[in-house]
Amino acid sequence: MDGFRLGLIINPLAGLGGGVALKGSDGVADQALALGAMPRAAERTRVALQTLLPLRERLEFLSFPGPMGGDLLEEMGFRHQLIGELASDITSAEDTRRAVTLLQDAGVALILFAGGDGTARDVAAVAREGQPVLGIPAGVKIHSGVYGVSPRAAGELVRRLAEGGLVRLTQGEVRDLDEAALREGRVAARWYAELSVPQEGHFLQHVKQAGMETEELVLVDIADWLRDSWEDDVRYVFGPGSTMHGLARELGLETTLLGVDVIENGEVIARDVTEQQLFELVDDYPAHLLVTVIGGQGHILGRGNQQISPRVVRAIGLERLRVVATKRKLGTLEGRPLLVDSGDETLDESFPAVIRVWAGYKEELLYPLASSH
C-alpha cells in the first residue's frame, strides 16, 4: 500500500479507422495505416494523465511496454513498472487480454484502458467479476457505458479516487457494432458483457429523503441488500459499533453494541465472542467479515475490535471482508484514507490500496486504504 496502484493499457490501434473513413479499427489496422491514418490513442491517454500530474508522487502505474503504456508513462515522468512482453511490433487483442490478466494478478486498484468498443470487449473477455476498470475514449465508436465522457473526464474521475473522494461502483454495459455490417450499410449492435466501473458519487445524495442522508435510512437499505444476499450455512461476523448494531437491528437480530457477534442462517449463534472463540468459529468454515469505520479517524481494524485478530482475518480471507459506512461518516474523514492497524504488519501491507465500502442498497463505493505503520 505504498502508493495508489493503477493499471494502464493503451490500444495503440484504437481510432485508426475514423480519419480514413473506415468506420472503425477492428481488423483494418493495416489498411488504415496504408491510407495514412495516424495513431491517436496515446494522445487521448496523455490528456487523461495530465489531470493526474499533481498526484504523481502518490501514484504507481503498472503497464505493458512500448506503445501500450510504458513509453507514455516514461515520457510524462510517472512512477511505473512494466509487465509482460509484446509479441510483435503490431499489438493485438491478445496483448490487451494478457495485460488485463497480469494487472489483475498484480492487484491493481483500477485498470485504466484507452480504446473503443472492441477494446472494451477484449477487457471484458478476461476481467474478473468486480474488477474496477475505466475506459479512456480513443476509438471511432464508443457505444459502451464503461468510458469517461472524455479523456479529461476519465482522468478527473481517477484523480478524485486517488485523493480520497467518494466514488461509486456501477455496472457498465459493453456494447459493440458489427463493423462488417456497418461498412455494408447495416447498423447492428449487440450487448456483450458488463464491467464494474467507477462513477462519481456525492457526499449527500438522495436516500429516500430529499437532500438528506440519515444513518437509519441507509441501514435499512444495506439491511435489505444483505437480506437479499444471505448465503446458507455461511457465518457472518459483525464487528462492534453503532453502525453494525443498527444494521443487525434492521435485520431483526439482537447483537451486542461493543462486542463481536456471529450470525448464521439468520440467527445469532454467538454473542460478544473472544478472539479464541471467534477463531474457532471461522477456522475452516465459510464466513464473511463485516466491519465499520471509526468516524473522523478512519480505522476499520485495530481500534475497538481486537477480537478480529490477524489469524481471524486470514481464516476468513480479505476477499470476504466488507466495510459498511454511510457517505456522511466517510465525509468526516475529509479525504483521509481508511486505516488498518491489526498488529501484523505483513497482513496490513497485504490489504489493497482501495477497498469497497457498502453505502446503500447495492451501492458500493471505492475508498483509499492505508496501513497505520
Image (cartoon, rainbow, N blue to C red):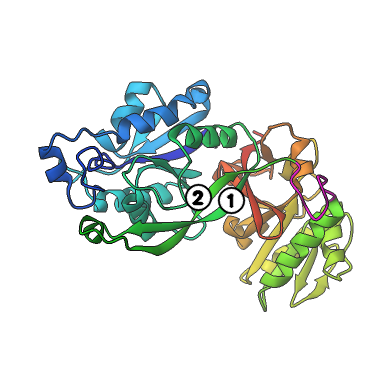
Q: Quadrant of residue 282?
A: bottom right
Residue behind mark 1? 169
Front in this rendered view, residue 201 or 303? 201
Task: Report if residue 70 is visible in the image.
Answer: yes
Find the magenta span and give its range.
Answer: 204-214
Q: Residue furthest front?
A: 185
User: Can you give x and y, in whole percent of width and height, for residue 364 in the image?
Assistant: 64, 53
Question: Which residue appears at 79% of the width and 42% of the height?
Answer: 328
- The quadrant of the image that shows the C terminus is top right
Residue behind mark 2? 132
Q: Is residue 316 magenta?
A: no
> Label 1's element?
strand
Label pair 1/2, CB-CB below 8 angstroms: yes
Against 204, is 144 above or below? Answer: below
Residue type, numbered disc 2: Pro
Task: Report if residue 302 is visible in the image.
Answer: no
Dot 1 or dot 2: first in sequence order is 2
Front in this rendered view, residue 329 or 187? 187
User: Can you give x and y, in whole percent of width and height, for residue 132 in the image?
Assistant: 50, 50
User: Can you give x and y, in whole percent of width and height, for residue 176 in the image?
Assistant: 35, 57
Front in this rendered view, residue 320 or 118? 118
Q: Residue furthest left?
A: 34
Q: Is 95 on the left or on the right of 107, as rendered?
A: left
Q: Is 258 on the left or on the right of 11, as rendered?
A: right
Number of marks drawn: 2
> Label 2's element?
loop
Q: Is 179 on the left or on the right of 310, as rendered?
A: left
Q: Main secondary structure of the magenta part?
A: loop
Q: Is residue 205 magenta?
A: yes
Residue type, numbered disc 1: Leu
